[in-house]
Image: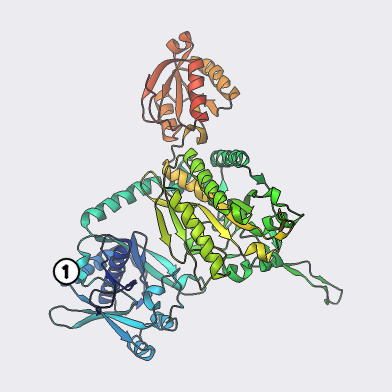
């Protein structure tokens, strides 16, 4: 339940003056509580089997939970089976979760054999960060331990340092949970700390929901962009280059080229001006922007350059620190500031496909969705006070129309608000900016979900969450208000009344990053891209060798229209050619034999195996170019 807005156990005492709300197990809060409770059962099962395994952290995560351990040996698949069996016994026993408040000294005494827990005790009072899950342990104003109690005997079965709350009984886990896998994970996410063993699991209110989730996972595995990237020869991560740094192969390069080209054309249509900035800069720029204060841990280390010494090794000219840029916004501020600006130029929309570099922890890297080198479709828009709302509305409409053109149509919005501990600016600025974003979000007619404390340090954010073909949600576009950087960079424009005023800055990322968007589209389409994005759009397959020349003429006409097309002149038999190009997910196979050549026609074969025979070449060209022009997804034969 929620008591006066705070999540509490059902066993918590309440008064007549308290405001109490129920928390259902199907809600976001309910699922987190269920999954965190499952993590405790997992940890208890591990220590029943292996009492020497030291405990780390066990938070709920999207669709599941994990718990970190420090065992003598890494977990094996056989270990997971044994742990799962032990968990079933604990669930069936119906142990009660009982909350107990303790002092620091009491907690240290009770957990003397748990070195990782002892480290967390020092974070009491909310100092723990959510990023690595510490807040589930000590994120409140007081330290608490949860005891697992045998319901029949009252005996203490197990205990863990935990903020809570939990479900009343382990029996509530039912049979809607499962262990998934184990992996290595650095303690508290830092490579400087020991490597622990992490066990991942999932938990749902019912077995049917568990099975539905497992089915979605199976489909997601088939669509995994890392797997498809290899199968379709799109990109790779050579060890010689380094972790999180991708290279795009010719086929992947074509897809990326089309994604970026369409985006650039839309930018120009919508009043943007294209700029460009270097990949590296003096550290003083990021001191001005405050990124070195707020974001340094996410940046690559400094390169100390330009220092000069004399023959004796004495420094005669001091060097400077240079950084690979993690953001494009400070550069755009300098472009704005490069000359005097007038209110007549606003809104000024500066856009750049700018490659940035972020030192993501190795354990968080994941194919193209989390990399260390990424290209942002970044834009920064400078507006007057009275232009803010209309511009944000315009940006959201631009976002929706562009994403739909890529084939994503199912959206909702998320409003990220201020974290008082990690923000700059006045309360009045934040309140006005947040209210403005909320109004625009509500007027869009889409669902608007709250994300308390999720804003960047410089201003609130509204983000577009898109659902893909199998129902997964991806954060794509973001629109953020910033009243901090214009002040830091002393940006100003000449207002209509002759005074100098400070513009308001809007950060807008539509695709997020080209690499991540590439991965999302690859999984959304399971590699079978719409015709306009497909690396090879048409392949000609002659029924026999003598029809190859005829198909060469057809393909040459398609190429004149800019179609990416080729003829398969290999020695393979026609059925094998068809299988090869179907597996490569090519949209159109044009097959020609004697009847087609005599009639000046071709036969279409589509991805799903359907065919359309005897189509005149001119009509075939029009249909193919039309599908490209309209961004059509073609998987089966057109109706005649």
Task: Locate the C terminus by quadrant.
Answer: top left
Residue found at the far top of this picture: 598
Along the line of sight, the residue nearer the viewer: 235 or 66 = 66
Residue 34 image position (x, y, % from top left) = 28, 66
Q: Name the residue: 23% across, 74% down.
A: 10
Q: Name the residue: 17% across, 72% down.
A: 94
Reply above or below: 470 against 621: below
Reply above or below: 205 against 112: above
Residue 261 image position (x, y, % from top left) = 59, 39
Confirm whether residue 236 shows in the render: no
Residue 17 image position (x, y, % from top left) = 28, 78
Task: Locate the N terminus by quadrant.
Answer: bottom left
Element at label 1: helix
Along the line of sight, the residue nearer the viewer: 144 or 590 = 144
- Residue designated by label 1: 92
Residue found at the far left of this picture: 152
Q: Quadrant of residue 489?
A: bottom right
Q: Name the residue: 29% across, 49% down.
A: 215
Q: Name the residue: 73% across, 57% down.
A: 337
Reply above or below: 437 against 471: below
Residue found at the far right of this picture: 311
Is 402 on the left-hand or right-hand side of 488? left
Residue 84 image position (x, y, % from top left) = 25, 65
Is the residue marked by circle 1 packed among few (<14), some (14-19), or many (20+) residues within 10 Å?
Answer: some
Along the line of sight, the residue nearer the viewer: 484 or 185 = 484
């Amino acid at each position: 339940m929620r008591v006066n807005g705070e999540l509490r156990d059902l066993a918590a005492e309440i008064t007549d003056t308290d405001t109490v709300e129920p928390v259902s197990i199907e809600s976001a809060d309910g699922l987190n509580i269920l999954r965190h409770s499952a993590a405790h059962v997992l940890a208890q099962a591990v220590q029943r089997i292996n009492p020497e395994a030291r405990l780390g952290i066990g938070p709920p995560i999207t669709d599941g939970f994990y718990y970190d351990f420090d065992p003598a040996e890494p977990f094996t698949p056989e270990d997971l089976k044994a742990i799962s069996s032990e968990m079933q016994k604990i669930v069936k026993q119906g142990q009660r979760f009982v909350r107990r408040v303790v002092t620091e000294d009491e907690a240290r005494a009770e957990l003397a054999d748990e070195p990782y827990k002892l480290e967390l005790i020092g974070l009491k009072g909310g100092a723990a960060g959510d990023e690595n899950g510490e807040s589930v342990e000590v994120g409140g104003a007081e330290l608490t331990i949860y005891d697992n109690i045998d319901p029949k005997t009252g005996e203490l079965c197990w205990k863990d340092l935990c903020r809570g709350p939990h479900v009343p009984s382990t029996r509530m886990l039912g049979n809607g949970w499962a262990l998934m896998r184990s992996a290595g994970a650095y303690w508290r996410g830092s490579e400087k700390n020991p490597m622990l063993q992490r066990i991942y699991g999932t938990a749902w209110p019912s077995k049917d929901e568990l099975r539905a989730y497992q089915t979605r996972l199976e489909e997601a595995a088939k669509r995994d962009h890392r797997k498809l990237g290899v199968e379709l020869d799109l990109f790779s991560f050579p060890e010689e280059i380094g972790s999180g740094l991708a290279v795009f192969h010719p086929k992947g390069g074509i897809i990326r080229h089309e994604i970026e080209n369409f985006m650039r054309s839309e930018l120009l249509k919508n009043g943007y001006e294209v700029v460009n900035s270097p990949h590296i800069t003096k550290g003083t720029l990021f001191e001005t922007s405050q990124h070195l204060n707020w974001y340094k841990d996410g940046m690559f280390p400094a390169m100390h350059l330009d220092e000069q010494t004399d023959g004796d090794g004495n420094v005669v000219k001091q060097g400077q620190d240079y950084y690979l840029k993690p953001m494009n916004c400070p550069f755009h501020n300098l472009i704005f500031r490069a000359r005097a600006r007038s209110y007549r130029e606003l809104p000024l929309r500066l856009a750049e496909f700018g490659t940035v570099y972020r030192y993501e922890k190795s354990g968080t890297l994941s194919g193209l969705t989390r990399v260390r080198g990424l290209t942002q479709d970044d834009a920064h828009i400078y507006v007057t006070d009275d232009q803010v709302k209309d511009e944000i509305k315009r940006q959201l409409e631009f976002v929706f129309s562009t994403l739909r053109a890529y084939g994503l149509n199912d959206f909702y919005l998320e409003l990220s608000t201020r974290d008082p501990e990690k923000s700059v600016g006045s309360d009045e600025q934040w309140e006005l900016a947040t209210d403005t974003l909320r109004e625009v979000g509500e007027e869009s007619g889409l669902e608007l979900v709250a994300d308390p404390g999720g804003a960047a340090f410089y201003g609130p954010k509204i983000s577009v969450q898109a659902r893909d073909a199998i129902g997964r949600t991806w954060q794509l576009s973001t629109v953020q208000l910033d009243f901090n950087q214009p002040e830091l960079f002393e940006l100003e424009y000449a207002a209509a009344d002759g005074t100098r005023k400070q513009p308001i800055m809007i950060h807008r990322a539509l695709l997020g990053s080209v690499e991540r968007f590439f991965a999302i589209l690859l999984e959304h389409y399971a590699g079978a891209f719409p015709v306009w994005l497909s690396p090879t759009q048409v392949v000609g397959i002659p029924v026999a060798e003598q029809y190859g020349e005829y198909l060469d003429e057809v393909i040459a006409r398609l190429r004149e229209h800019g179609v990416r097309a080729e003829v398969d002149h290999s020695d393979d038999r026609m059925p094998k050619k068809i299988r090869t190009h179907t597996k490569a997910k090519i949209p159109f196979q044009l097959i020609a034999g004697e009847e087609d050549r005599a009639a000046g026609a071709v036969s279409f074969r589509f991805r799903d195996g359907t065919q359309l025979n005897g189509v005149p070449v001119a009509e075939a060209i029009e249909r193919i170019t039309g599908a490209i022009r309209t961004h059509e997804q073609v998987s089966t034969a057109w109706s005649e």
